[in-house]
Image: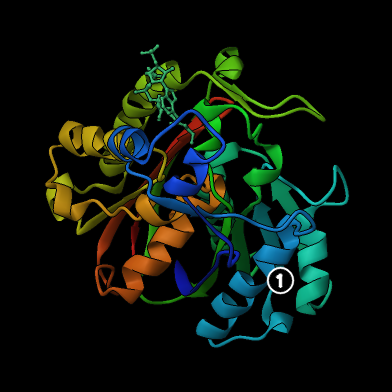
Amino acid sequence: MSAEIKGLGMYVPPRVLRNNDLEKFLDTSDEWITKRTGIKERHIAEEWDRASDIALPAAEEAIKNAGLTPKDIEAVIVATSTPDMTFPSTACYLADKLGCDNPMAFDISAACSGFIYGLTIASSFIKSKQFNNVLLVGAEVFSHLIDWSDRTTAVIFGDGAGAVVISRSEGDSDILSAVMSSDGSQWFALHCPVGEKLRMKGKETFRLAIQSMGKASQKALEKAGITVDDIKLVIPHQANIRIIRALAERLNIPEDKVYSNIHKYGNTSAASIPIAMYEAYKEGKLKKGDYVLLTAFGGGLTWGAVVLKF
Ligand code: UT7
């Protein structure tokens, strides 16, 4: 029995904030942001948009693309650090908005690694025969947590949602291995106290991101019993183009096999990998039967990697 990714969906709010717009109210420049991060623009939700609002269109598209209806979904998981409320979970709101039939619903708080954690949980539900169809959404409105006078974080993050439906199947498309870790002693590197704004120690986070994603990726490949040469596409968390390039070098994989769309969306935290998967699939870079490596890193610290046959 396999856990197959059957449908993909994504949504970003229509409002675009370009580097030139940031120049108007921050001591920054398009040149600095492009060179240091690879980001050119990001999408920003309205003040009243909640995570479940932007998760909804992504989830609807993923369910439709899987050939299912919301009634077929038995578990709804939302990976988010910007939930609608402290409780109930964003997943409960989303399941209701979708018109699901009383599914299990809960959120994952693992910052930018939330989608990787979620994929592993969803796959375990499928393989233990608990459920046949699980919806997993990474949905973030980080713009609500940003101190718009802090140039070290305001230029980095964007809002968006990416969704996948993971279904039980008998084919060979499968989630083959997962490695997930955390180190709470490094919480201060990237955190957001309740009711306050996001804080990040960029340099430390940068260094730890490359190390941990590199190690997790190698372990996940070993666990899956394949090598980096078998991988058709690496889809890393989109935090910084320099991190992505350093990861490619560390894994000894050519840059054209490492997907990036950070220039369009910035860092959308738990949404970045499913948004990238969606676009890679639409662009024909991610195909059925391909071995794919996903890896992420974020606040917690948390990190992980997944190898799958798409
Ligand atoms: O998603 C979860 C994980 N998050 C990450 O992985 C983020 C990892 N970190 C990073 O991506 C990078 O560290 C940043 C993009 C945040 C910063 O890049 P950096 O190359 O590490 O810059 P820095 O913090 O060392 O700053 C270099 C200079 C400083 O000026 P001085 O001290 O050299 O005069 C900063 O004040 O750049 C300055 N600076 C800026 N200048 C223009 C910092 N932010 C900006 C800015 N515009 N937005």
Outermost residue, front side:
24
In the picture, the quarter occupied by the N terminus is: bottom left
Q: Quadrant of residue 190?
A: top right
Q: Nearer the viewer, residue 308 or 27?
A: 27
Q: Quadrant of residue 143?
A: top right
Residue 47 can be seen in this image: yes
Please name the colour scheme applied to the rendered image: rainbow
Task: Determine the residue positioned at 60% across, 64% down.
Answer: 13
Q: Is residue 170 above or below residue 219?
A: below
Q: Nearer the viewer, residue 206 or 251?
A: 206
x, y (%) of residue 203? 41, 18
Q: The residue under label 1 is which amino acid type?
A: Glu
* Badge count: 1
Is disc 1's CB within 8 Å of ligand 1?
no
Residue 310 can be seen in this image: no
Q: Quadrant of ligand 1?
A: top left
Q: Is residue 69 above or below residue 206?
A: below
Q: Secondary structure at mark 1?
A: loop
Task: Determine the residue positioned at 46% across, 61% down.
Answer: 275
- How packed mark 1 is, by other alpha carbons closer than 10 Å (few <14, some 14-19, many 20 or more), is some
Task: Determine the residue positioned at 28% across, 36% down.
Answer: 35
**Residue occupied by mark 1:** 74
x, y (%) of residue 277? 39, 63
Q: Is residue 181 left or right of residue 242?
A: right
Q: Is residue 69 left or right of residue 93?
A: left
